[in-house]
Amino acid sequence: MDEVDAIVVGAGVVGLAVARALALAGHEVMILERERQFGTVTSSRNSGVIHAGLYYPDGSLKAQLCVEGRQLLYAFCEKRGVAHRRCGKLIVAASEEEFTALDAVMAHGAAAGVDDLVRLDVAEARAIEPALTCAGAIHSPSSGIVDQHELMLALLGEAEAHGAMLVYDTQVDAIGQAEAGWTVQVGETRLTTPILVNAAGLGAQALAQTIEALDPTLVPPLFLAKGCYFSYAGKVPFSRLIYPVPGPASLGTHFTLDLGGQARFGPDIHWVDEIDYTVDPALKPAFLAAARRLWPDAEEERLQPAYAGVRPKLAGPGMPTADFVLQGEKDHGLPGLVNLFGIDSPGLTSSLAIAARVAAMIGAP
């Protein structure tokens, strides 16, 4: 039986950030990843946006950790040379009827400590983005974009420099309690550890259900929200991210740029029963309509299917929006175990703050 100081299951951006935090605290960390590469699931199938922290309910973990995480993320990227850009974002109202929704975004942002938001009228919005069509907007200068792969590579590199080890193509079969903490069964190998972090993303609930000592009623339901993206070929007239006012289950089909200048629209939202990353070309009319709502001159022939992601939601259609769940000993009474459930947007932005919170929950020095 092999012993290790800490095991993190899942090598997405959050799992890698947690592994880094534990390694920096002096723990020997083993990261177990069932795929053949890190970050190939949720962490690489999103917009790559650094969120400022505008949308989330007052006092929620999403609100707190997004603002904390955004500051930590910018500092980390600057220190480690990770490609990113603080390009800013406009959240736009298509008509005066959506001003109430803009007011709510301003209020949530202010309550979370986002102190640089600026409300713009039509003329002010068009002065900085002349091609935009809107009735009014909010300018969020702290929003930005990041190269997700570079970010994860830097997190892994720093974790490994402090003794962490990543093991690919590794499926956890069962988790039991032991005198020293936890036993983790991987094929014919049994590992023991006093610290176990479940950062398995879309697989977090399934992994938690293998933990014999965990009350199954503490494992929340999982809802799969598929989001598709369409790319836009050629030059676009925007230098900032452009978002509509948010809907009840998502931030809406928005315009983003990557660091290479590739423009895309998405994600939309489809509630699905199984993970599927195909993008149906028949969605193009809906994406074109969403694009033209922001930019009437968007050309149909330049809009093409790109990729899709699936978000691990804790609330389904018609249900109130759910918060992140960082479940530790205070919740389940099991020392050394942390389960991370429902880490959807703004999980990437919040990753370093989540990692710091997890390290504090398990008493890492």
Image: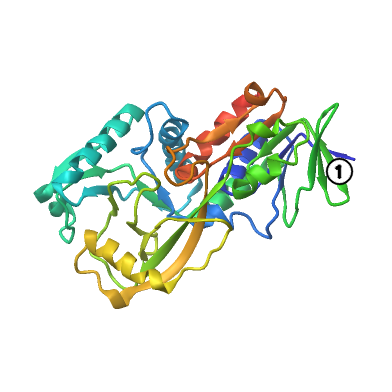
Q: Quadrant of the C terminus?
A: top right
Residue 276, can we see it? yes
**Is 262 rendered above or below residue 227?**
below
* Residue at image location 23% in from the left, 40% down from the top: 102
Q: Where is residue 265 in the image (x, y as percent from the top left)?
A: 35, 62
Question: Quadrant location of residue 177?
Answer: top right
**In this view of the protein, which residue sits in the foreground, 320 or 151?**
320
Q: Is residue 12 left or right of residue 169?
A: left
Q: Quadrant of the N terminus?
A: top right
Q: In this view, does 200 lie to the left or right of 130?
A: right
* Residue at image location 44% in from the left, 53% down from the top: 48
Q: Where is residue 182 in the image (x, y as percent from the top left)?
A: 79, 33
Type of amino acid at the residue the image marks with label 1:
Arg
**Is 195 rendered above or below residue 231?**
above
For disc 1, the neighbor class at 10 Å (few under 14, some 14 to 19, many from 20) is some
Q: In this view, does 121 lie to the left or right of 167?
A: left
**In this view of the protein, which residue sits in the foreground, 165 or 186?**
186
* Residue at image location 13% in from the left, 53% down from the top: 127
